[in-house]
Each structure stands twice: as C-alpha cells, then as structure tokens.
Amino acid sequence: MIKSLASSELKPLVFAVFVSVSSPCLSQSAYGISFDSLKSAIEADSNAYLSVARRYASMDTTLSFNEMFALYYGSAYMPGYSPYSDGMDSRVVEGFMEEKKYEEALSMCRSQISKSPSTTVHYLNLGWILSTMGDSVNAQIAYDQYYSLLSIPYRSGDGSSYKDAMVVRSVNDEYMILNAIGYRMSSQALIHNKGIPFDQMTCLNRDNPDEEKVFYFNIYQPFSIGMMSMFGGSESGKSKKKRDRSNKKRTQRGD
C-alpha cells in the first residue's frame, strides 16, 4: 500500500533514461532532478516518451523508476497536457458505472488511458470497472498501476514543508494521495513561496478526526504550465530571464 512507502526510498536514485545530468532548483524539480533537463530531453526525442507511455497504457508493469518518473512528470511537456481535466474525465466514467453501462465505461476509460497514460485516476477507475465485470486478474494489475504511478508524487517529499512538498503533475493527485493515506481535506490555501506555487492542505485523519495535519504540495507543473496551456498563455522572454536568474541564485545558495 502507498501508505507504507517512505519518501526517502527513491531520493538517491539517478534518472538516466531521459536525463543524464541534473541541475535541480526548487521550482522545477523532483527527487533532485531538474524538470528543465527533462523538458529538453523530451523535446529532443519525444518518441522515447511515447514509447514508455504506450507500454504503461497497455498494462506493462515492468517500467523502471526512471521510466515511471519520465511518464509522470514528462507529460507536462507533451501536447495535450491538461491537468485540470482529470476530475471531469473521471466523472464521465463514474456516470456510466452508476448506470451499469460497464462496457461503455470500460471503452471510455481505456480511451482516456490511451490519450493520457500519466493520469492516475484512470487506472483506479479501470480497476473498479474490471473488478465489477468479474475480471479480477486484470483489475489487480490496474490497481497496481494506479498505486505505482501515484507513488511517484507521493515519494517525492513527505509534505511537511515547502522544501519537502510532494510534487504533483495534477491537482487531482493531491486528493488521491490524501485519500490513500487516510486523510480528508478541511481547508486549502494557494500560497506562493519564493515564486513557487504551493497548495497548503489542512487535513483531518479519517480514523481520528481530532488529528489535524498540514500537507504541502508543489503545484508548479499544473499551475505554471497547465494554466498557461489551458489559456494559451506563454511566458515572456523578460519574465523567463528573470525566473532563470532567480533559480540560478537559489541553486547557488542551496535553497
């Protein structure tokens, strides 16, 4: 279960499939791996990303950590990245399930996975559908895929502070993680720290409502990249240079 995973387990790993050299900065990194280098590698050879994505969409469970990292965070640098549509897509499938239209739900879910193989909730829905239809073997594979993919943002930090925030590609994954570890949100705040967008989630333990805990999620990808993509915006050259100078200073200071 994801609840038992320690955030420190994967931090020593080096990402080698797409990125050979990392130059981490707080705003654009996870596991100390620079998103800028991941973006450059995918732009140079998007077929490598697509190959990994197709394997996972076809229920290939043999992907390495490096490939899972690339699949999850690399989606932000591929055409069609739409991190705020995850919940809406999921509700369409849930609607079919409530109407007991299982074949329609399965067809829709598989189509969603084909279009967006890095979206965690699709695999959770697939497991639910297959289990309901009596295919327990493939249902378990789908559930395993869900937890494996969700473990990438979950293990990226312990969520205790801005510095150790969990880094997500989709805001919906914040709720998936909280649900998986037994918490429900009671309040949420969007906060910028050193120019980086974070969600500060105050949560209650489902089994012990008196226990309150705050989790921090780094939402650089969905907020800074996804929002620009949705509204057709782009970062000006001036603002990019300013951000790059700021990131360079933070890296030199070791922030």
Image: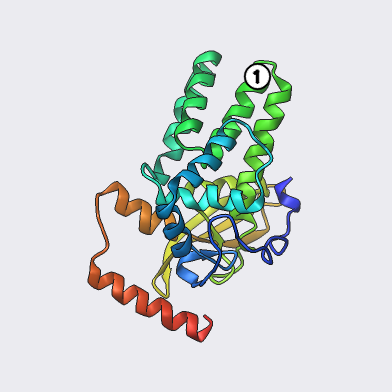
With respect to residue 253, does 25 lie above or below? above
93 or 151: nearer the viewer: 151
- Identified at 64% across, 50% down, the residue is 151
Judged left or right of residue 255, residue 127 is right
Judged left or right of residue 200, residue 224 is left
- Identified at 44% across, 47% down, the residue is 46
Give coordinates of residue 19: x percent, y percent: 53, 61
Give coordinates of residue 196: x percent, y percent: 42, 68
Give coordinates of residue 144: x percent, y percent: 69, 37
With respect to residue 211, does 47 lie above or below? above
Indicate the quadrant where residue 30 lies: bottom right
Tell me which colouring the rendered structure shows: rainbow
Q: Can residue 198 be seen in this view?
A: no
With respect to residue 183, does 7 lie above or below? below
Give coordinates of residue 165: x percent, y percent: 56, 64
| Crowd rating for badge 1 (residues with CA inside 10 Å; few <14, some 14–19, many 20+) | some
Q: Is residue 104 visible?
A: yes
Residue for badge 1: 132
Position of the N terminus, as image quadrant, is top right
45 or 10: nearer the viewer: 45
Q: Which amino acid does the dot numbered 1 rest on?
A: Thr
Judged left or right of residue 65, residue 36 is left
Indicate the quadrant where residue 143 lies: top right
- Identified at 61% across, 60% down, the residue is 156
Image label count: 1
Q: Is mark 1 on a helix, strand or loop?
A: helix
- Identified at 58% across, 53% down, the residue is 69
